Image (spheres, rainbow, N blue to C red):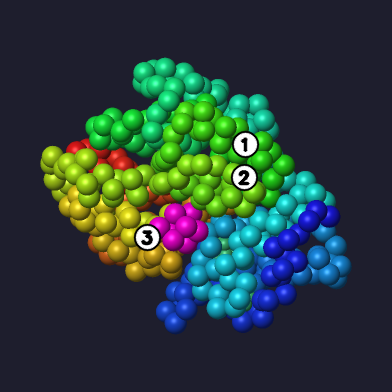
Amino acid sequence: MGSLTVIDEWLHRCIRCGNCKYVFKEYEPSCPSGEHFKFETYFASGRIRIAQGITKGDMEWHEDLLEPLFACTTCGSCESQCLAPHSEHIVDIIEEIRAFAIESLGALPKHQQFHDNIVKEQNPYGEVHHARKLREEHYLPEKAEYVYFIGCTAHYRQTQIRDATLSILKKAGISFTIVDEYCCSSPLLRTGQTDLAPELANHNIKEIQATGAKRVVTSCSGCYRTMKRDYSKMGLDYQFEILHTAQLLEELLATRKLSIKTSSETEYAWHDPCHLGRHMNVYDAPRKVMEIAGVKYLEMEQNRENAWCCGAGGGARAAFSDWSILTSEKRVAQAKAIGTKNIVTACPFCITNLRDASSKESEVVDLVEIIDRIT
Ligand code: SF4
Ligand code: SF4
């Protein structure tokens, strides 16, 4: 048994009141996992109960516990609804008991695949690692004021987000470069596979610091959370500021370093990525960007800290793909309910799932893509 710091400190605080199952006072479902699987063990309260049983020695590890512990998107909605003192640690508890489960039962095969791909190619998709090549293709310098940390999903899957971000950075005249980045470690940390994380984090920090950059911008909400919160939690020291592209866009538009040249006519529903909103409390920056840029957007009924998850996070998309897409379909239906089939968000992972759940006529885009089109 490893060192269970968060569990040791917070596990006994859950009073099993059940608030984590619904949006407080609005009675809207809040937990995509519990809402789908319907059993107590698929809500935060049940997962905490399993963790209590295991750590007190009242239960023994059995492979039947893997699905309840891993069929969770780590969306953090339970944290927003819970009123008890441990509320902000619920996802940490779930991630910690996952790491403990892996010690006894091993990782889920799909999650093990992330791990093996990262060992081989430094990204969870197993694509040939080519970050250095991209720097050469874009004639980027070795030293710069900013580093654009692309993130594996924008780098190898949703490349239009990477390209739009590169385009914006050039248009705004920012001194930037990219580094030989390794996976930020988010897919490993979220799925309890913590062993490689310090090595990946140290590599990224070393690469970024070698450029002399004082600011790092990333277009991935998962990378943003991991670099800003988890690298500090690992006790790593770094001397640069970390921004999400939504925050940089707000700054660039407000200071007129980026100017709007044409209007955006399409109306979108705004989707708050869990790792940007609930995990990092960044709700206003993307909304301000859309207001300054004149992007027409609508709020879905469940928004900000009550937003319904896209279903992709926490290893859910890889290991429980049917449920993951059903979760995303519910979010797409929430957009339709307010009169639009188009969705704008700020995370390549959300884009993947929301696109897969949307019709071909729908436009599901990252905010940076829209801003690139109109500047
Ligand atoms: S996690 Fe919080 S909201 Fe959920 S049952 Fe426990 S105390 Fe109640
Ligand atoms: S993190 Fe999300 S999916 Fe997991 S228990 Fe909490 S509300 Fe449910």
- Under mark 3, the amino acid is Tyr
Q: Residue at point 30% right, 33% down?
A: 174
User: Is 94 displayed left or right of 261 in the figure?
Assistant: right
- Under mark 2, the amino acid is Leu
Q: Which residues are magenta?
A: 275-283
Q: Nearer the viewer, mark 2 or mark 3?
A: 2
Q: Position of residue 99 (x, y in %)?
A: 73, 52
**Image vertical order of residue 23 relative to residue 166, above or below:** below
Separation of residues labelled 1 and 3 (CA atoms): 29 Å
Is label 2 in a helix, a strand or a loop? Answer: loop
- Return the mark for residue 202: 1
Q: Nearer the viewer, mark 1 or mark 3?
A: 1
The answer to whether residue 276 is magenta is yes
Using the rendered image of the protein, determine whether residue 329 is visible from the camera's viewpoint: no
Is label 3 in a helix, a strand or a loop? Answer: loop
Mark 3, residue position = 283
Q: Are marks 1 and 2 in contact (CB under 8 Å)?
A: yes
Mark 2 or 3 closer to N-term? Answer: 2
Question: Ligand 2, what quadrant?
Answer: bottom right
User: Is 32 displayed left or right of 67 in the figure?
Assistant: left
Separation of residues labelled 2 and 3 (CA atoms): 27 Å
Using the rendered image of the protein, determine whether residue 229 is visible from the camera's viewpoint: yes
